[in-house]
Amino acid sequence: MDTPHSPWRPPWLWRAAQLAARLIVGAVARLEVDGDVPDRWRRGPLILAANHISPFDPLVLAAACRARGVSPRIMATGGLFRAPVVGAAMRHAGHIRVDRGTAAVGQALHDAAEAVAAGSVILVYPEGRIGLDPGMWPERGKTGTARLAFACGAPVVPVAQWGSHEVLPYRAPKGMVAAVWRAVWRRPVIRVRFGAPVELGGVDPAVPGAARRATDLIIDAVTDTLVPLRVDEPDRPRHVDPGRPVDTSRSHRRRAAGG
């Protein structure tokens, strides 16, 4: 078991997978990474909170994190862990299984808190799914990321990405071959930005509703980090995926940066 006296280190398989991700992303798009992770946090403890816009996101973030010298353990859907080959690789790489919609979902938070306490970097999607906001801005988040931050006391760094939705469609693998060939031909720009740590010190975990308030601060920070990546697409994205559904039930009301 990981302990604070034996900090977790990424196995060679995960380091190799990050390199492979960088090569794959480079083959279909132009990756631009902005911002940084302070040296003292690159090996944890740290929580990276990213927006989720495409099935291609995990490869993009693996590549971007490699560019910044970070090897995060990813909180990923349980379906990946049930796949015969991928599941074994995910377990070996130290990623954390999340069985959404089941009684076991709480185990993921416990496992993630233990991993952070052991010195790991954890990558989470606070929205809990690929966002379905019509403007592709971050949705109202689930409270798991905030509760994880409360449980382990680790800093939360927002990570914004833009452009991965132009490589893989929402319903991939349906339509994936045509979309990838189109990306290889057009080579869209994928931008990733690491933002400033989220200030959660003013939120008292003991006060009712604290997890909701902290979650909104995290989503605000991810949104603020995303703004500079899509200055020419402030309302709606230029690239529209006809297979992507729209759901406004979880829309997040953005505050002005610094407000």
Image (tube, helix red, strand yellow):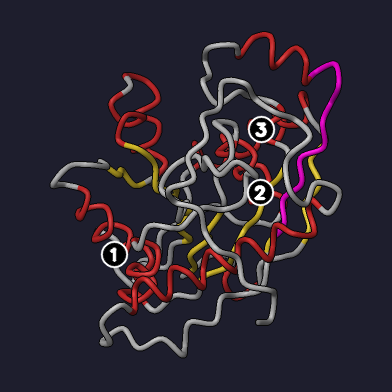
Is residue 228 found left or right of 145 in the rendered image? right
Q: Name the residue under label 2.
A: 66
What kind of residue is marked 3? Answer: His
Q: Is mark 1 on a helix, strand or loop?
A: helix
In whole angstroms, how far apart are the C-alphas of marks 2 and 1?
23 Å
Q: Residue at x 57, y 51 (%)?
A: 51
Give the extent of the magenta segment: 184-193
In whole angstroms, how far apart are the C-alphas of marks 2 and 3?
21 Å
- Crowd around label 3: few <14 · some 14–19 · many ≥20 (10 Å): many
Q: Residue 114 carries which label?
A: 1
Asked if disc 2 and disc 1 are in contact, CB closer than 8 Å, the reply is no
Q: Residue at x 59, y 32 (%)?
A: 56
Of labels 3 and 1, the one closer to you: 3
The residue lying toward the viewer, choosing from 28 and 55, is 55
What kind of residue is marked 2? Answer: Arg
Q: Is mark 2 on a helix, strand or loop?
A: helix
Q: Name the residue under label 3.
A: 165
Q: Is mark 3 on a helix, strand or loop?
A: helix
**Residue 153 in the image, given as x and y percentages of width and height:** 39, 79
